[in-house]
Amino acid sequence: MEEALEPEKKRTRGLGTRVSTTHPRAAALSSAPQTQGQTTVPKAPRKPAPRCSTAVAPVLKTQKPGPVVPAQKPGTTAAPPMVGGKKPKRPAWDLKGQLCDLNAELKCCREKKQVLDQENQQLRDQLQEAQQQALALGAERRSLEEELTRVRAQAEQGQRELGNLSAHVLELEERLGTQEGLVQELQKEQLRLQEERTGLAARLGEQERRLQTSEASLSDSQEEVASLRQEAAAREAVLAEREDRLHGLEMERRRLHNQLQELKGNIRVFCRVRPVLPGESTPSPGFLQFPSGPCGPSDPPTRLSLSRSDERRGTLSGAPAGPTRHDFSFDRVFPPGSGQDEVFEEISMLVQSALDGYPVCIFAYGQTGSGKTFTMEGGPGGDPQMEGLIPRALRHLFSVAQELSGQGWTYSFVASYVEIYNETVRDLLATGTRKGQGGECEIRRAGPGSEELTVTNARYVPVSCEREVEALLHLARQNRAVARTAQNERSSRSHSVFQLQISGEHAGRGLQCAAPLSLVDLAGSERLDPGLALGPGERERLRETQAINSSLSTLGLVIMALSNKESHVPYRNSKLTYLLQNSLGGSAKMLMFVNISPLEENVSESLNSLRFASKVNQCVIGTAQANKK
Ligand code: ADP
Ligand code: MG
């Protein structure tokens, strides 16, 4: 802006200078409109107009040369001489002189006027020029003012932009500050990471050293492992050989065991005499005797003699005849004092046979109250000493199966427990609504062409431990109690058949074996007193008894037929023999307990039982074959 104004100043000064130097009067005229904002040129003090020649002289000098002073007219006195620069006053009388003077003065004034006119004209020109200049300057000033406004607006805009930029700069500075803080933090982090990296590098070095050591020891170990593998392979070969031998020995054991059992007889009969119970009359001495075997008392007893005094028989003299001795011989006889463990020991071999794949069937035969249930299930009260054959046999099975698992055998057991009463089959393991009711069960073949028999509607429960078996026996007892009526102790009038289907598998050798183990508590074998009056209860009793007798005699006949190798074996004549079909016959091993009461009053029934058992004992069933697949 200052620059924009500068040329005008210069121009103004230039003009002023020119005016003041050359035309002091014009300068005074032209300076009037230029007062504002301009440096005022000091006015030259107005000199008094020169009176004549000296004052006009410079001007006149510029005039055409010619006579300036008119020649003194004749008759006039010459102008008095100048005294001290002043024109001497003409005397009053010198009118001519005075006229001359006045003419001269007029002439001077005219010249002066002419000069002034010229000067005036010059000044007017100058004024005009100055006015034009002023107009141009005004226009220039306006345009400069516009420019100034625009420049100011620009300046304001610039100011605003500057303000914005300053704010932006501030913001950027702030951000810069933050970024700097971040950079510092990052630098710190970088430092820390560098330290860490140094530490890690050190650790890596250490690890690498260790790795090298480990690799060295690994290669040592690998060599060792290779040699150990060779050793292990050699040992495995030895082990496999030993396993083979063991398996061979196991099969040999099974064969020999079976031979032993066959030598003992595939049908064996054991006689067990129960003790006299509290409150029962002691039999007379010698009523029951247990003669020792050929090797003396150390031999387990196998004989029993029973003395019976027959009142009907008399001597010729009329004196009563002495008692008749009845001798019986069985595979084993257990006198009253024999414990449950002793009895089980004798049959544990048969349980082993069942695991080896031979069907095994164990019966308890005898009159009611002779100890059949005690023998099979055990005494009351849960005394472990009193446990019967069923829980003991199962425990033995489970433990032997466990031992055989070490040789690669896997066994599974499925239990069922039914009752046959009046030729109807009832499930003793029924639960829920069927409990005690015993819905009709039927004996059927497991499938078309199958040898296996199954009871419809009966539960077949997989068992793997003693506790499960105990629970089943408990359930069977409850079911029997529900079925019991006031007049009729049904359990003694029915056959209870506990069956365990044993399945074994040797996956490694592709061997399988399966066989049923049947433990049967038969119905009381007593005959009905023929002298009894036949009331409605007795008639029912008679029907029951006939059913029992029929099934027991069928059992005898089946055993006989098997023994005689008859072509037809009448299994189907009773539900009992039909159900036990697969547990009897060729490949089966059978054991019959004949339970005897020690009481004299039961002598007749005891004799009947012993006779039946003796007949069975005479039977031999052909060589047993294990059910191997
Ligand atoms: P069954 O089943 O043949 O009818 P039980 O087994 O019910 O006969 O036996 C009748 C009674 O005799 C039961 O009280 C039973 O505890 C008892 N008893 C049977 N055998 C023996 C025994 N060997 N030792 C002790 N008590 C026995
Ligand atoms: Mg009983």
Image (spheres, helix red, strand yellow):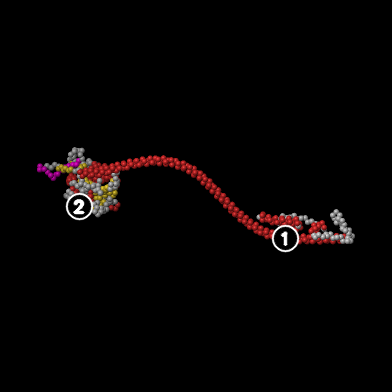
Image coords of residue 346 (percent x, y): 23, 42
Q: Are marks 2 and 1 in contact (CB under 8 Å)?
A: no
How crowded pointer 2 is (Cα within 10 Å; few <14, some 14-19, many 20+) is rated as some
Distance (Cα) linking label 2 and label 1: 167 Å
Taking the spot 62% from the left edge, 55% from the top edge, the residue there is 155
Residue that carries the numbered disc 1 in the rendered image: 129
Location of residue 94 in the rendering, given as x and y in whole percent from the top left corner: 89, 60
Per the image, is 307 magenta?
yes
Name the N-terminal-most of marks 2 and 1.
1
Q: Which mark is residue 542?
A: none
Residue 406 versus residue 72: which sits nearer the camera?
Answer: 72
Q: Amino acid at mark 1?
A: Glu
Q: From this viewpoint, is residue 581 visible?
A: yes
Name the side, left or right, on which 108 lies relative to 223: right
Q: Secondary structure at mark 1?
A: helix
Q: Residues within 10 Å of mark 1 (few under 14, many from 20)?
A: few
Disc 2 residue lies near ligand 2 with CB under 8 A: no
Specify whether 164 is left or right of 623: right
Residue 136 position by quadrant: bottom right
Q: Is residue 202 above or below residue 536?
A: above
Q: Which residue matches tag 2?
A: 573
Residue range in magenta is 301-318
Predominant SS along the magenta part:
loop
In this view, 96 is above or below 511: below
Q: How many marks?
A: 2
Whole-percent x, y for residue 349 in the image: 24, 43
Q: Secondary structure at mark 2?
A: helix
